[in-house]
Image (spheres, helix red, strand yellow):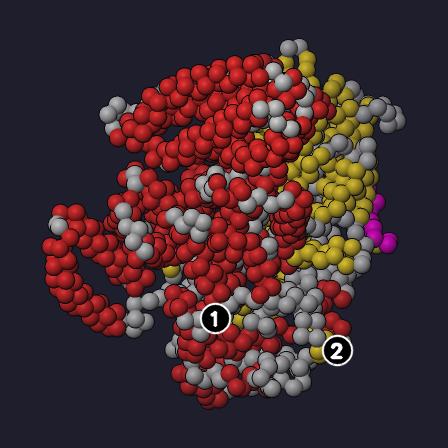
Amino acid sequence: MPEPQSSVASSGSVDRLRNAFGGVLCTFTLLLIGVLAFSIRLFSVIKYESVIHEFDPYFNYRVTQFLSKNGIYEFWNWFDDRTWYPLGRVIGGTVYPGLTLTAGTIWWLLNSLNIPLSVETVCVFTAPIFSVNASWATYLLTKETKGPGAGLMAATILAMVPSYISRSVAGSYDNEAVAIFALIFTFYLYVKTLNTGSLFYATLNALSYFYMVCSWGGYTFIINLIPMHVLLCIVTGRYSSRLYIAYAPLIVLGTLLAALVPVVGFNAVMTSEHFASFLVFIILHVVALVYYIKGLLTPRLFKVAMTFVITVGLAVCFAAAAILVALIASSPTKGWSGRSLSLLDPTYASKYIPIIASVSEHQPPTWPSYFMDINVLAFLVPAGIISCFLPLSDASSFLVLYLVTSVYFSGVMVRLMLVLAPAACILSGIALSEAFGVLTRSMKFQRPTLDDVSSTAGDGSSDTPTNSEMVSKEKPSKKNRKKDRDSEGSSPVDHRTEEKLLVLPCGPSAVGIMLLIILSGFYVVHCVWAAAEAYSAPSIVLTSRSHDGFHVFDDFREAYGWLRHNTDVDDKVASWWDYGYQTTAMANKTVIVDNNTWNNTHIATVGTAMASPEKAAWEIFNSLDVKYVLVIFGGLIGYPSDDINKFLWMVRIGGSVFPQIKEADYLKDGNYRVDTHGTSTMLNSLMYKLCYYRFVETDGKGFDRVRRYEIGKKHFKLTHFEEVFTTHHWMVRIYKLKPQKNRVRGKLKFKPSSKTSSMRKTGGKKSPWQ
Amino acid sequence: MATTPAPLRRIAALLLVVLAGVLASTARADLVISKADRRVDLTSHIVRVLASLKVENVGPDPVSQVLLAFPNIQAKNLAAIRAFGSEGKVKGQSTVLPIEVVQPSGAPPELTFFSALLPKPLEKGKTLYLDVLTVFTHSLQPFPEEITQAEAQLVVYQDSAHYLSPYPVKAQTLAIRLPGGRVESYTRHPNAKLVDSELKYGPFHDLPPFSYLPVIVHFENNNPFAVAKEVIREIEISHWGNVQITEHYNIAHGGARLKGEFSRIDYQSRPYVRGVSSFRHLIAKLPPRAHSIYYRDEIGNISTSHLWSDSMKTQLEIEPRFPLFGGWQTTFTVGYGLPLKDFVFYSDGKRFLNITFGSPLEEILIEKLIVKVVLPEGSKDIEVSAPFPTQQRQEVKYSHLDIVGRPVVVLEKPDVIPEHNLYFQVYYKFNNISLLREPLMLITGFFLLFVACIVYMRTDMSISKSSPSYLAKLQWDEVQATVQKIQGIFEQCLAVHDKLEASLRDLSRTGDIQSCKAARKAADAQFKELSKDLKPLLTILQSSPQSYQIWPKVEDLIAKEREMQEKLMTRHSTVVDSFEKKLRGQDVENRIALQQQKIAALRQEVESLLEYISEI
């Protein structure tokens, strides 16, 4: 014992002090973890500026602006006529309102305290704030499973896991930012309910699930994972009343609450994603009934009853299942939404829904992206799984199940790496904490044998140890404490007497600790690097560092700024759907399609127009009342994600709806080439012309720096479009549709002009909007 | 005249008709302008006319005012008028003369009259030198009104070659300074000549009052026609040492509109040819020691700007996101902080802000300027003194943690030009104690929060004293207390063990068997007592439902301790026995070696169990 033997009272007070100290230390550590989680996400603000990032966040920002200006009731009823022209979009009924309402509430609270932060500032910092919450929720969840030490470790790891940072840097104002917090917190409350059997936590759990449903479509993960776990518990004979309390209220309350969210509505009971939970709900009740009857009857009677019930029950089940299958089969997608189906069958999207496949974050990840996003956690997770099995509790089995399912999902869609990250963090936290626990303990237990030797060999009274002994005692104990602080206390759960005898020798354990610290060090370095370099770019501002200094490419905002101020407020702008959200939010213009890809036909129309020759494209755009066409062109400065590289999706999506677009017409040797080998269809498409109009005059050759070759068709004129604005680095080019009268050329008299108009009509039949 | 646009011609005709009528009437007073030299500066889009007049009083009575006449068409574009006068034979020290609008009886309604009030009446035969500076906006009409990217911007300026005055003018000249470049046309006149970029009319001699000779110049002017539709300039005073200025601009190119397409390749390859009429940057001269300068718009930071600063000024070159061609517009915000001591002063129990009125941008015309001075919360007795008339009103702004809000003085003025960049003052009373209010508020708030936390932690907030969770908590507390007591007892046990060991060591040293036996006896007694103490605690623990986690450990602990105790006793008796039998030390060692190891192992286990329990 480090403290000298003393009376009961004093040792009690020392213990209390130690507990209080531990509590304060734990709180303080959590606070620091919060600071870490927040500040590591500020690289984007420091290196760039406080601005909303990428695409979807701009939409969320716009919705939040609307909410803060017009109030909640207007928000629910908002029909947005500035997008999906001429269809419009019912925003109130088609968004997950969680994020918007959260940021709106924060803004409202701050403003009612007379702290005049702008909506933009609040939106920029919502994600870091919620990642702080997420780390704390991770602490709670892990603590509930493996004690506070593992909890602190897991929270620290989650605070800086690159995968989560990529979605929650300051400015990345997206649903996932709050949804991950909601996800972890819901899991925590579920585990908490499972451990305590308290109805209070069960209710909180349903509310937290409600918040998750409000926030992200990924709530279906929860509503499938928890039933899976319940089923696992039942199958492994771990049924208890606590399990019942943890599950039944969640399903009943949770489903009712979920149905309140407009975007979910009756889907909460009608789509297949939710059926598993109802099935398990029924099974749970059957099992509960069986356990109840088992308590009432004698074993022999129970056996008889069991056989009877099973036969009847099976019959009923079959009937129900048959009805269910019939219901599901009657709906075209078998009741599953496209995204969910592509989760079950990874090849589904690329076969049937090009629009889902065209999103880069819906692609399966590569191995390097695992290393990039979770780094050393990938190696620690197996150790965590092992320690979850020693001993296996309800909570730890839940964690294992969570990990296994999320590993599968992350393998299907790179975006779902985000769901894997918390699981990986929790299990790595457990693994590290256990490893530190074992190693420090084995260092600690070297001491008593030394002690014994010294006490037998030593002379003088042992009640008052000599000074040198004191030192030798104090030193390791201090060291141990420090280690404990690193790992935040060894977990006491499996503190077995057997293990204690299996202590490692002092040297190897010290080396082991050093190695673990080095490993953690690598992780920290990688995370900071990822936060600073890889994930902080807002993507609307690009920077490059070359030999002659630092360059800023602010072309997107230049173009949006120009559109905002120098075109009529009701002008319609056509662009590929990637830029729809930004155009509505930054340029305040009506767009034809945007990132909410709800109408495939509409997107296909724009894709068709881009892939068509100039005249046909003009007709399509004119029929859509489009005044400006915006294209992204990276050929001058070598910006790779430009519209020529996205052109294949325009062709594919366009071709999937309008058969006159054939992918083969654009392909040369299986590639979309725009050099002299390119097909004439390709070189005459609107996209090619708008991108490369007068491009050859920049260097005389027309060398495209993205494709790394000279373009195929260099000198050409536009007949139906005119250039109205091109940004400084040519990244955004805006063209205006020439007014109709300009198309009647030269000497055309009445007759030929009627001919052209009739030609236009026949052409119009091909055009999808006639 | 073929190039003159129709409206101008109409106006000229109208004026001539009017003036014919006026000519008949007599002059206002017996003043004669013996010499009038006018210089018109057309280099920027703000037209500045400096008229140097030599006024003589030829009548019998002293005259106390000089009338200045402008046609309404010019007067409505008049942004500023200033007169400086000096009396005497030669030009001496000049004084600024107050100017007011007057409507002399019998004056034609097509003319607007201003009167410069002399500080002392002009005696008979005396001469007055009068410099009148007038600044006009919107006086350069782009013609043609729409040009392509490659064309230069041509503008038309129209004025009278004769000085329009209610007094006879003996000798006069007019010099028009053009920005250089092409002059498309100008009104021909025998007296007119164009030298380099200066157009001269005159001299003219002995003209009657209200002479008017319209002249029109059509020339190239590619200087930036920066016109701000509206500028909101917010000056916020913080007595912590900062004056924060935020300026919101809505700027347009007020020249000829761009027609047709804008081609970047043309603009980039030959910017001064293809895009000559556009402007791409504006210069702002900020006060020295300006800091924390930012330049952004509603979609974020604008990264194209440059800053130079020295002890005299801070120069900021701001570049809008895109070059501004005719008719294009953009908005942006410029903000900066200034040290408080440079701009806020204290005199006669009142503080006052002394700062320039207009915008720091050079050569910019502001069609509507709103200056908001945000005074600190708690300011009283607010007064404004401005060098020219402005619309004034007061508002309240709520900013960081305000309760009653900050008083805001709003000054509004149309058509503001660089000549209006004069100092104005806002006087107010402010107590320094008010500075501490917000920090104190925060301190109080946090203090109350912590107090609330402490109260919450220390009081029993459960509603029902019989609820299961409350009972469970009570039981848990009890279990913890019991466990602590048990722990104490075990620690005492261990202490007794140590004592026994010590006695054995003493034995090996001194060979005093009796004392060793006494120690043994004492230890036995203590063990008995301790186990007696332990019993009730164990029953409590066993009966408590909350102890299901700890109970097995405690049981384990007891068993281990028993075993250890037994081993120790046997060892003790073995050692004592062997001493009594006077065996050799080596044999004793051999006999107890095995036990020693077991005891050590057991002790380790007991200690770790104790530690585990204490962690609960």
Q: What amino acid is labelled 1 in the image?
A: Ala
Q: Residue at x 44, y 71 (%)?
A: A346
Q: Give the percent coordinates (x, y) of residue A62.
A: 47, 51
Q: Chain of mark 2?
A: A
Q: Which segment is the magenta one?
A: B195-205
Residue B596 placement (x, y as % from top left): 57, 33
Q: Residue B566: percent from the left, percent from the top?
A: 46, 29
Residue beneath the point at 75% across and 78% down: A701
**Residue B196 within the magenta-colored segment of the rendering:** yes
| Vertical position of residue A439 compared to residue B141: above or below | above
The percent coordinates of residue B472 (x first, y second) are: 30, 29
Q: Which residue is mark 1?
A: A357
Q: Determine which residue is flagged by label 2.
A: A701
Residue type beneath disc 2: Lys
Residue drawn at point x = 26 percent, y = 30 percent: B468
- Residue at 63% x, 22% y is B508
Type of secondary structure dominating the magenta stretch: strand
Residue B542 seen: yes
